Image (tube, rainbow, N blue to C red):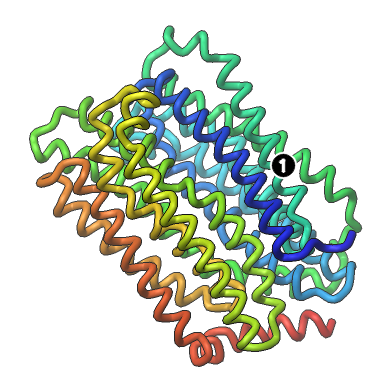
Amino acid sequence: MKGQSLKKQAMVTAGGSALVRAMGFGLRILLSRLLGAEALGIMELASGVHMLALTPAAAGLPSAVSRLTAKAETEEEKQLTLYAGRSLALGMGVWAAAALLLLAPALSRALGDERTLPSLLFFVPCVMTVGVSCVYDGYFLGRGRALPPAVSELAEQIVRMGVIAAFASLVGRVTPAWRAALPAAASSFGETVGLAVICFAAGSIPSFRRDRRLHERKRALRKLSLPLVLNRFSHTALRSLCSVMIPLRLAAGGMQQAEAMSRLGMLNGMVMPLMLLPGLISGALSAVGCPAIARCRTRKGESRLARKLLLAALGAGAVSMAGLYLCSPFIACRIYHLPELTPLIRSSCFLAVLLPVQQTLSGLMTGLGLQKHSLIASLLGAGFTLLCTWLWTSRQGIQGAAFAAMAGHGLTTLWELTVWRNRSVLRGIAGEACEKNEDVLTAD
């Protein structure tokens, strides 16, 4: 099937993402009322481990598959890339699921709250399916077809909401630990259905098990995806460490444990999803921008494309920031029924600008083979966030944690912008080996 234009891909991806995000936002509101702030805090504490378990298969492989698929010249090479990526994702997913199942009791103790154990166990099936589903997403985006991933995400969200609605009547009869496990169980059901949908869209592909090129293609995918995996790992580890650190630092400032967990639920479970709303635009820009810039042959074409994408991300972030600041009393009082949420939303709203710009920049750098420099930026930002979280949370409360997140993301964005300005030099240093490897694969 013929690929779509970049503009149409972005519109389809953004439209599907907008619908999924709108449903997800409604689900968040439902969960905040259904679970309560304490159970929401337990859920957020466990979600860091969920993301760590997904990182090996779901972080770097989709972008690597997308890039190699975009560069492939024949249909057979595109299918070989999908087959290799699917094999890698399935293998890593099985190992990660087994590790999570065995280590769940120890991890719940390490998180500082053993009530996270049900959430960890219910998420195990999801670990095996997400990586494979993401590889299919990358394959379709590399081919210039944005509709199948959008439909798959929509199916996931519908099933997730259906499962939560089906068990909503039972939530009031169980403890906060089991209430917090409901979203994990719903995610496992939803991801399974989403994988089935996108596999059906892809149809059958030939087996390359005995093909001599399979090993080389897997090696190329590993090489391209490793910096992205480490980048995502740093973000996920940061979120996990902050989720553990914030209640401890709040307690050090004199707050009770239950109240500290509630504050964590307010920040990570209510405020941060608001800051991610521009992601429905920047996520689409990053997804389609990575393979598109990989196909660019001139520096002028790269600059023109990057300028359009970054301006779009900046515009979406600025509009979101203004809207969130002005509407924060309505959101806090009418949607969440928590008036004390208003100052926290306002003090966090600059993240609505930083996050979409950073996400779009990361996608562009991946398309140019500058993943290692993006990783360095991510590590610097993560370290700075942890330091600021430790210093500011006990003094300024939960708002200190929000300021720390802004400081870390701001440092990461500035570093990536600096790298982007010097990309002509850095691309020759960091990306030459990758480009040579891809040329050899294409020649095969």
Residue at x 19%, y 29% (from the top left corner): 257
Q: Position of residue 417 (x, y in %)?
A: 42, 76
Q: Give the vertical position of 136 relative to 72 (above or below).
A: above
Q: Position of residue 77 (x, y in %)?
A: 84, 70
Residue at x 50%, y 9% (from the top left corner): 170
Q: Is residue 377 left or right of residue 4?
A: left
Secondary structure beneath dot 1 equals helix
In terms of image quadrants, where is residue 355?
bottom left
Does residue 338 appear in this view? yes
Quarter that holds the C terminus: bottom right
Residue at x 18%, y 52% (from the top left corner): 390
Quarter that holds the N terminus: bottom right
Does residue 90 appear in this view? no
- Residue on which disc 1 sits: 152
Q: Position of residue 30 (x, y in %)?
A: 47, 23
Q: Is residue 377 left or right of residue 230?
A: left
The residue closer to the viewer here, 389 or 113, is 389
Identified by mark 1, the residue type is Ser
Residue at x 68%, y 38% (from the top left corner): 154
Q: Position of residue 254 (x, y in %)?
A: 8, 34
The residue closer to the viewer here, 132 or 193, is 193
